[in-house]
Image (cartoon, rainbow, N blue to C red):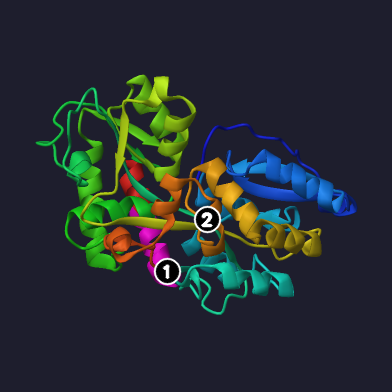
Amino acid sequence: MQRWMAVAALGMVSTGVWAQDDDKLFLFNWTEYMDPALVEAFEQEFGVEVVQNYFTSNAEMFSKLAAGGDAQYDVVVPTDYYVTRLIDAGLVRELDDPRIQQGREDLMEAFRQPPHDPEERYSVPYLWGVTGIVYDTSTFAELPHSWSVLFDPEINPDQPFALLGGDPQVSLGMACAYQGAGFDCVGQEAWINAAKLVSQTLERGNFTGFVDSTAAVEQVARGVSAVAVTYSGDVDYRKADSPEIYGDLAFFAPEEGAQLGMDTFVVPARAPHPQLAQDFISFMMRPENAAKAANYAYYRTPNEAALPMVDEALREASRLDPETSGHLVTTPLIEGESLTMLQQLWTEVRSR
């Protein structure tokens, strides 16, 4: 999930030079998704420096690793369904530190043996959130908790709205959910129907463009858009940090179904410092640190042992009970020809 862009540029450094920096951990992360106090505590405990670089979408992250970044970074933070793609592409390595396996015992049952890594060999849950709608309550007194606010021109005939950029599976999933096929739709027929709906939506005069989650919140706050797609934590973070600016914003997960996105820690296949990477992951799995990470980012923790230390409102949201999870789904895993077809469809939609 993403926040303010404050990129610490690492430059075009050769793999050999990176590998020589034995006192550094190279972290590839979403923007503003790591508590600086935790970074400092890790640096002090292990006598190293954490150097962060940032991405704004899973697609961007994958492309960077596939282009040689798997030899430049020690820890990466992909969303759940992208872990499978990284594994299949040989871009991540197995985790073999016993402290990590022990730390898994603190996780909620819902986050154990996940579909993207059923044997728990390559990834560790970090934080999770929900993909949904952010809107300006001063423009809309109320809205139906539905994807129709994006796809039905009768619901929003003239107010500006934006769609989420990045991965097509999420973008088409919204249209699938609205059409009754479920956010976790798969297959040619469902995707083609969703692509047609999105194409029609792009032609509407009040469509303002594709933006990432952070930009979506900013645009609604500034009045550039009145409705947009974003992640739950990005709204909560800003409302808590600057209520005078973001106090009129509201967020909901559409009732037809929405994405439960779990971000994870993985270690790239050719990480310069794989053991230090596992030191970092183990450090972040400690309940007290998992709680601090959630309280900072305003995303929800999968760590049950951390819940007593999480802020009250966030603690309740983090409990994945049946009422909370009833209309939330993880993004399904697709690969091979299905993935190629999906990407081709999305390219056609974006090129019109």
Q: Which residue is mark 1?
A: 333
Residue 206 as seen in the image, left or right of residue 240: left
**Residue 164, percent across and down?**
37, 42
Looking at the rendered structure, the kind of residue marked 2 is: Pro
> Residue at left 64%, top 62%?
266
Q: Is residue 212 visible?
A: no
Q: Which residue is mark 2?
A: 308
Looking at the rendered structure, the kind of residue marked 1 is: Leu
Image quadrant where residue 184 sits: bottom left
> Bounds of the magenta span?
334-345
Give the overall secondary structure of the magenta segment. Answer: helix
Residue 347 as seen in the image, left or right of residue 15: left
The foreground one among 268 and 255 is 255
User: In the rendered structure, are the residues bearing label 2 and label 1 in contact, judged by CB atoms less than 8 Å apart?
Assistant: no
236 is higher (above) or lower (below) than 319: above
> Closer to us: mark 2 or mark 1?
2
The foreground one among 255 and 30 is 255
Is 344 inside the magenta-drawn segment? yes
